[in-house]
Image (cartoon, rainbow, N blue to C red):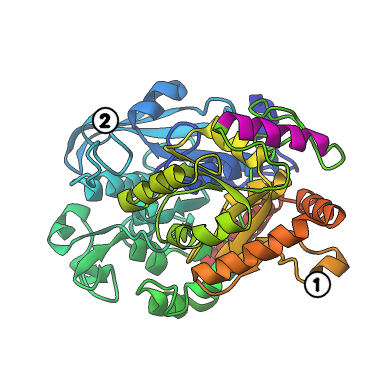
Amino acid sequence: MSVSAALKPASPGVPMRVLHVAAEVFPLVKTGGLADVVAALPVAQAQQGADVRLLLPGYPAVIESVQGAHPVIDIGACFGALRVRLLLGRMPGTALPVYVIDAPYLYRRAGGPYQAPDGDEWPDNLQRFALLGWVAAHLAADDADPAWVPDIVHAHDWHAAMACAFVAEHLPTRAASVFTVHNLAFQGLFPMHDWSLLGLASRLMSPAGLEFHGQLSFMKAGLKFADHITTVSPNYAREIATHEFGCGLDGVIRGRGAAVSGILNGIDDVVWNPATDPAIAQRFDAERLEGKAACRRALQAELGLQPDNDAMLMVVVSRLTSQKGIDLLLAAMPELMAMGVQLAVQGTGDPALEAAFRMAEQAHKGRVQVHIGYDEARAHRLIAGADMIAVPSRFEPCGLTQLYGLRYGTVPLVRQVGGLADTVVDADEAALREGRATGFGFDAATARALAQTAQRAVALKRQAELWRGLMRQGMGQALSWAQPARAYLALYADVLVQRRA
């Protein structure tokens, strides 16, 4: 995409300036769906006329990939780092402007963005992500890059949440802050004795501030101090205000009242497009489903699965954790095998669940295939070739894999929580009759409920015309980022009016 295509205003007048603050972005650094959102939403907003920039930590992959990076300001020593600079460059592929915090002591290290190579959390994560929020606040306060000052600071998840506290309590600014909860279960908790490292007033060391059961909570910084809070689906916004899904913060969320809302994620429908996808065996669309059949045959051959045309070929592309309901799938395995399901799994996570899947693969050769790891191109082949994609999560803020499934005519089987309930219409009799059905859903977080729902899907797949109608209905959904981008821009405008009233 050219610079002009990405950044050309859609309407006359001064465009709104939006700074997205995040710890990861696809394809440079990715541990989950957050990276996909941060890669796609800002570009969609720029295409609709906003003046959008990113702010990222200077991990090795970011420093190496950002194009034309040059210094904006030499910050000096802070948050334990002796040398901190702010750079400005362009994202590869989209040419979107991106600020990079060049702090080698904090960010240039082996391992992941949050964990060391041995899997342990980095012991200085408080400093690493406090710096991210602090720099965002200084950009908003007109003393980091006077040539570009944001109207909106949009902080994503706990890693960026301190931006909201610094903006509200530390640095005067006309900018408004929006905080998006991508997953409330990951909260950024640190010892309270590290409070002094933040440079904030001691009055915030209380339950009315950032204290959370004797710890310091970055997530709470976003929930308490952002001008508005969003989640990545409307249903999840309602769920996190309840005891069951609130992770101990439901009272804080209820206290924000109407300042909490949900906007459903989209997907990058250029990257995820079966009609143009270079990673799959044969391209297809809703009118050329024979290409999907070719992808199915190719996938069975690639994975060493039996070439069974009648089998329900189900895939899982997921973190292998109990949050994702992966243990429910394992518990339902005997029933799934008995009803003729073939299962392909890709992901990493809980070592016990990884080992259990390896055992299942050995026990069901030719019917179960497991890949421990993540491969983006392989994920495309799995989703393109499968009949069904399973997302049996105990909770799910939005979920992206079920959206990819819909796009590729791969029918989702989901637990009806969070964004899964917002995006998948269960194929009950009424929905099938009215042409609304897009997948299969179940309520109880049990292996029995999952297996019973899979049995409904297997039965419907035997009715070829109904199954093709289900596939086409899913493929016809509007899943791009265009609508979410418009919704966020409208929200920003409302928040700015309220803040500057």
Q: Main SS of the magenta segment?
A: helix
Q: Tell me, for residue 415, which label it has, or none.
A: none
Query: Is residue 302 shown left or right of residue 216?
Result: right
Residue 349 sits above or below residue 92 on the image: below
Q: Residues within 10 Å of mark 2 (few under 14, many from 20)?
A: few
Query: Is residue 96 shown left or right of residue 437?
Result: left
Q: Position of residue 47 (x, y in %)?
A: 69, 39
Seen from the viewer's position, the closer of residues 428 and 90 is 428
Q: Position of residue 370 (x, y in %)?
A: 47, 41
Q: Nearer the viewer, mark 2 or mark 1?
A: 1
Q: Tell me, for residue 429, which label it has, or none.
A: 1
Residue 219, image quadrant? bottom left
Q: CA distance from mark 2 to mark 1?
A: 53 Å
Residue type at mark 1: give it.
Glu
Mark 2 = which residue? 110
Where are the magenta residues, as a range? 289-302
Q: Residue furthest top?
A: 68
Residue type at mark 2: give it.
Ala
Quadrant, the C terminus: bottom right
Residue 294, image quadrant? top right
Query: Is residue 133 shown left or right of residue 390?
Result: left
Residue 74 sits above or below residue 330 on the image: above
Sooner in the amino-acid sequence: mark 2 or mark 1 = 2
Quadrant, the N terminus: top right
Q: Can residue 299 be seen in this snapshot?
A: yes
Q: Position of residue 443 (x, y in %)?
A: 58, 73
Residue 29 sits above or below residue 323 on the image: above
Query: Is residue 294 shown left or right of residue 250?
Result: right
